[in-house]
Structures are given as structure tokens and as C-alpha cells.
Image (cartoon, grey):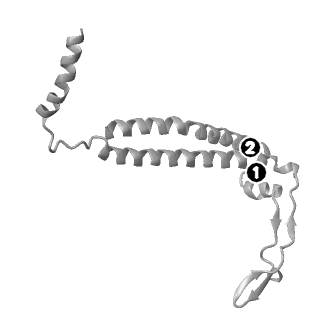
Amino acid sequence: MKKYGRVKNNRLFFKQAIPPFIILAASLLMYLIYSFASGIWAEDYFGHFSSLLYTWDWANPENYADFWGLTLLRRWPPLLNEPHFVAEYWGAYILVPLWLTAGIYYLVVIQAYVARAMMIEKRSHTVFEKSLEDFNYFNDTKKDAPAQDAQQSNK
């Protein structure tokens, strides 16, 4: 059972891992086309993508106060960046979500694979565990004999 379970689990893993790899292949193709067209190969895509996110000034020491030896937030820090669209960063706006989607999808597939492998290992020890201790074949056949005789006499 364990061998069959592993084979089936591996096949299902590879089948489920195809979509994230297709997403990664599409994003790699888009990255190559974008970089070739723009001529910029080393670009901070995650930094450019952060222009769509809020950024607060957490490093400013004026936002914190010491209270009995604990450093606590005194006030909410001011915004350094409000979400805004920059036309030159369109490649990052497409590539970063593709990378994050493929990465998270693949992590879920791996987690499912490991969970199935653990369940196969656990069940391989319990499924065929029926004990034959104190089992008497002849006692069990005598219990079934009257039921079989009754069925034959009804016919």
C-alpha cells in the first residue's frame, strides 16, 4: 500500500505543480521581452511595485516613547508614500503579482504533497493492523451456519 500511495501521491503532485510552473514560465517570457525591449536587465521590480502600496515612516524615533523600559508607539507614523501609478513601472505591476501567485500556489501544492505523504505513512501502519490473536475460524463459521441453513431452506 505504501508503494502504491507514494506513486499516486507523486503523480498528483506533478499534475498539481503544472499551473504554477506555467505561470512562472509566462512571467519569465514576459520578463525577457520587457527587459530586451527596455534594455534594462537589473531592475528592482519589488521596489517599483511598492509604489502601489502605503509606506509609513516607522524608523522615525519621534514616533516612539519609553514607558517603564518598554519602547511603545506614541503616535501613528506619517506616510512616506501613498499609492500612485507610475507609467514606467508597468512591467513590475504585472510581473510581481505573477511571481507572488505562482510562489504561493506552489507552496500550497507542496504543503498538500507533504500532508498526503504523512497520511500515507500513518495509514500504512493502521489499515492492515487487524490482529488474529484469539481468532478461531471454526467458532466464526458455526455462528454463520444457522443463517446459511435458514436461507437454503427458504429456497
Which quarter of the rendering shows the C terminus? top left
Above-or-below relation of 96 to 57: above
Amino acid type shown at disc 1: Ile
Above-or-below relation of 66 to 116: below
Q: Nearer the viewer, residue 25 or 55?
A: 55
Q: Position of residue 126 (x, y in %)?
A: 31, 45
Residue 64 is marked as: none
Q: Does residue 46 appear in the picture of this structure?
A: yes
Q: Position of residue 117 (x, y in %)?
A: 41, 46
Please state the total of marks drawn on the protein image: 2
Residue where numbered disc 2 is placed: 36
**Left or right placement of residue 10 versus residue 144 in this view:** right
**Left or right placement of residue 144 versus residue 112 in this view:** left
Which quarter of the rendering shows the N terminus? top left
Measure the alpha-carbon separation of dots 2 and 1: 7 Å
Q: Nearer the viewer, residue 86 or 76?
A: 76
Q: Position of residue 68 (x, y in %)?
A: 71, 91
**Left or right placement of residue 86 versus residue 21 in this view:** right
Q: Residue at x 47, y 45 (%)?
A: 113
Using the rendered view, name the quadrant where residue 78 is placed: bottom right
Specify few, some or many for label 1: CA neighbours under 10 Å numbering under 14, 14-19, or 20 or more: few
Q: Secondary structure at mark 2?
A: helix
Q: Residue at x 60, y 45 (%)?
A: 105
Residue where numbered disc 1 is placed: 40
Specify few, some or many for label 2: CA neighbours under 10 Å numbering under 14, 14-19, or 20 or more: few
Using the rendered view, name the quadrant where residue 6 is placed: top left
Q: Residue at x 73, y 56 (%)?
A: 46
Q: Nearer the viewer, residue 38 or 116?
A: 116
Q: Nearer the viewer, residue 28 or 57?
A: 57
Q: Secondary structure at mark 1?
A: loop
Q: Does residue 43 appear in the picture of this structure?
A: no
C-beta proximity under 8 Å, tags 2 and 1: no
